[in-house]
């Protein structure tokens, strides 16, 4: 910790003309005596420190030593603030707040407005439009378990709709396609598994700890299996669902037909989930080919209609 603190002090003093010992002590949450010991060690390491007392005094690095006044560029600090902004909107806690404050303290006074403006140009909001917003609570429990290598217990809703108890050694939090997952070693199955947070309930961090294992790639087997099942189907759709189609297909795969209609080639996996996506488009979209997908859509839509009679 001492070495990390000394490096951080050097970076701060490269950015600022001067800082008082009290400011440094408060920033790093140590005593004033500890800061002066760090300053002496930095000086002995060959970085010339100058101090001055009275109004406007403080601790600084000799100007002649500063070949370039900035250790970090504007782009460097902006990127860090954007990344921390994403984390702070997902993870709560003093650590994130303190880190944000420390990074902001690196900003040269003459660049503060420019960097703040650029950092605010991208904003992250992972909260749901509708429904439950307990994601942050789950993420925070898992983050704490990761930090302390604590075993987790939770109920998991399976694809068949059954709730099963799972005991997990958590190793990694994952964000993919706007969905959060936790990857870990499942003690029930004795293998690494990936669990979707929206399917988790009754999540608890236990007092039992574990030893980290070598982590395999999270989605490689699933991705390979899905790639083998993937096929292109031709779709015609109405302009009113263009935004949704852009999310699935991308602009390069969409061709306008006129009269507010479009063609697209849609990546499709022939299972309940895939047909569920097609049915969610309602009467604003239809599969043109292949024929067997059209026929299966007719069957499923008829079954849906029967459910209301």
Image (cartoon, rainbow, N blue to C red):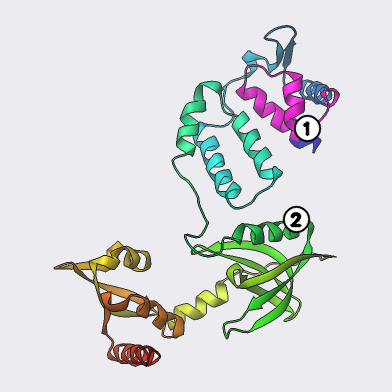
Q: Where is residue 229 in the image (x, y as percent from the top left)?
A: 44, 83
Residue at horizontal 75%, vertical 55%? Answer: 147
Q: What is the number of the mark on residue 147?
A: 2
Residues in magenta, as a range: 5-34
Q: What element carries label 2?
A: helix
Does 165 sit left or right of 33 as displayed?
left
Distance in Å between CA atoms under marks 2 and 1: 21 Å
Position in image of residue 288 (x %, y %): 24, 83
Q: Which residue reaches farthest top?
A: 54
* Residue receiving disc 1: 29
Q: Is residue 30 located in the magenta-colored stretch of the structure?
A: yes
Please name the predominant secondary structure of the magenta segment in the image.
helix
Left/right of residue 74 with respect to residue 258 in the rendered view: right
- Residue 231 higher or lower than 113, as above or below: below
Dots 2, 1 in contact, CB < 8 A: no
Residue shown at the point (69%, 17%) measured from the top left: 60
User: From the viewer's perspective, is 46 left or right of 262?
Assistant: right
Q: Residues within 10 Å of mark 2 (few under 14, many from 20)?
A: few
* Dot 1 alpha-carbon crowd within 10 angstroms: few under 14, some 14 to 19, many 20 or more: few
> In the figure, 270 relative to 85: above or below?
below
Let me know if residue 188 is in the magenta part: no
Residue 157 image position (x, y, % from top left): 62, 78
Q: Where is residue 162 in the image (x, y as percent from the top left)?
A: 63, 84
């Amino acid at each position: 910790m001492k070495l990390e603190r000394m490096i951080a002090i050097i970076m701060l003093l490269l950015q600022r003309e001067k800082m008082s010992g009290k400011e440094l002590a408060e920033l790093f949450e140590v005593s004033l005596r500890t800061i002066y010991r760090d300053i002496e060690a930095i000086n002995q390491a060959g970085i010339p420190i100058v101090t001055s007392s009275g109004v406007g005094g403080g601790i600084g690095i000799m100007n002649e030593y500063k070949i370039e006044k900035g250790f970090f560029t504007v782009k460097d600090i902006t990127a860090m603030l954007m990344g921390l902004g994403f984390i702070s909107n997902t993870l709560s806690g003093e650590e994130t707040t303190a880190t944000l404050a420390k990074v902001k303290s690196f900003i040269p006074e003459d660049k503060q407005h420019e960097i703040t403006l650029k950092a605010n140009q991208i904003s992250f909001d992972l909260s749901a439009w509708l429904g439950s917003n307990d994601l942050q609570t789950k993420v925070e429990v898992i983050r704490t378990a990761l930090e302390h290598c604590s075993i987790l217990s939770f109920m998991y809703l399976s694809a068949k709709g059954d709730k099963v108890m799972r005991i997990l050694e958590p190793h990694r939090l994952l964000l993919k396609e706007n969905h959060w997952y936790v990857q870990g070693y499942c003690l029930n199955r004795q293998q690494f598994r990936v669990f979707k947070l929206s399917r988790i309930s009754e999540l608890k961090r236990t007092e039992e700890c574990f030893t980290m294992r070598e982590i395999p790639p999270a989605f490689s087997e699933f991705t390979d299996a899905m790639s083998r099942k993937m096929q292109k189907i031709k779709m015609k759709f109405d302009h009113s669902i263009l935004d949704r189609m852009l999310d699935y297909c991308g602009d390069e795969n969409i061709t306008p037909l006129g009269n507010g209609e479009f063609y697209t080639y849609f990546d499709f996996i022939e299972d309940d989930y895939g047909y569920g996506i097609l049915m969610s488009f309602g009467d604003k979209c239809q599969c043109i080919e292949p024929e067997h997908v059209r026929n299966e859509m007719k069957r499923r839509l008829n079954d849906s209609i029967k459910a209301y009679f």
